[in-house]
Amino acid sequence: MGDLLLVRHGETEWSRSGQHTSWTDLPLTGQGEEQAKSLAPLLTGRTYARALSSPLSRALRTAELAGIPGVEPDPDLHEWDYGGYEGVTTAEIHRTRPDWDLWTDGVPPGPEGHPGESPDRIGARADRVLARVAPALAEGDVVLVAHAHFLRVLTARRLGLPAADGRLFQLATATVSRLSTEHGRPVIAEWNVRP
C-alpha cells in the first residue's frame, strides 16, 4: 500500500491576505513560485502510481514547479466553493457574524454557478477522489496537489472522520503532508512539511 502525498499550492495574493479563494483563479505570487520550487526535493525522485491536481492554475503551477511528473487535472480537487464569501476574509465576516465558523455555519450563496458548499458536500467530493485513487494506492504512492480546506476535508475522510473534522488540521501554503497506514489503518505520517 502506497502513501498519499498532499501538496498545498504556493502563496497567492489572497492566501497571503487571508481572503477566501475558491473559483477565482489567481496565479502564484513570486514568493509562491519560489515556495513551489522549494518542494522539489520532497517530491522528485519518487515514482507515483498517480498524480492529480486541482484544475486551477495555482495548483497546476505548483505541481509543475515542484517537478511532479504526469499530473492530471481533476475537478473534484477544486477548493471549497465559498459562495458569497469569495474574496472575503474571516475578519470581515466576523464584523457582521461574530460567531461565524466555516465548518459549522457554511456560506451564503454567491453569484450564479457558485451556491456555496457545506462540509458534507466537500466530503462527498473527497470520498470520490479517495475512491478513484484507491487502485493506484495499491500499486504505490499517489500525490494530490490542491487547496487548504479541500485537503483538510480529504484528510478527515481518509482517517474515517466526518468532513467537518477537517477543522482539526491546519495547513500552510506550499507544504507536503503524507497519509500512510499502520496496521492496516490510515494515519498521518507527516504533516505541513516544508524543506
Image (spheres, rainbow, N blue to C red):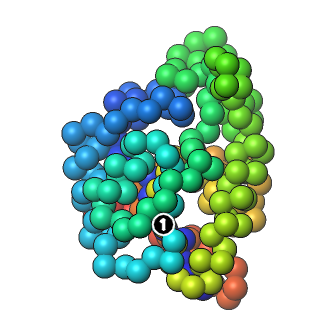
Whether 5 is drawn above or below 20: the answer is below
Give the total of numbered labels.
1
Kindly indicate the quadrant of the structure image that contains residue 103: top right
Horizontally, residue 165 falls left or right of residue 51, namely right
Q: Quadrant of the N terminus?
A: bottom right
Q: Amino acid at mark 1?
A: Ala
Q: Under tag 1, what secondary structure? A: strand
* Residue 75 spot, x, y in % from top left: 59, 48
Whether 8 is drawn above or below 69: the answer is above
Q: Which residue is at a point 28% across and 56% down the rendered structure image?
A: 65
Kindly indicate the quadrant of the structure image that contains residue 100: top right
Q: Nearer the viewer, residue 134 or 165?
A: 134
Label 1 crowd bin: few (<14), some (14–19), many (20+), radius 10 Å: many
Q: Which residue is at a point 59% across and 18% down the rendered structure image?
A: 93
Whether 98 is drawn above or below 21: the answer is above
Q: Is residue 43 visible?
A: yes
Residue at the outermost bottom position? 183
Q: Nearer the viewer, residue 65 or 98?
A: 65
Residue at the outermost top position? 96
Q: Which residue is at a point 58% across and 12% down the rendered structure image?
A: 95
Q: Quadrant of the C terminus?
A: bottom left
* Residue 60 spot, x, y in % from top left: 40, 50
* Residue 23 spot, x, y in % from top left: 53, 32
Q: Which residue is mark 1?
A: 51
Q: Is residue 100 visible?
A: no
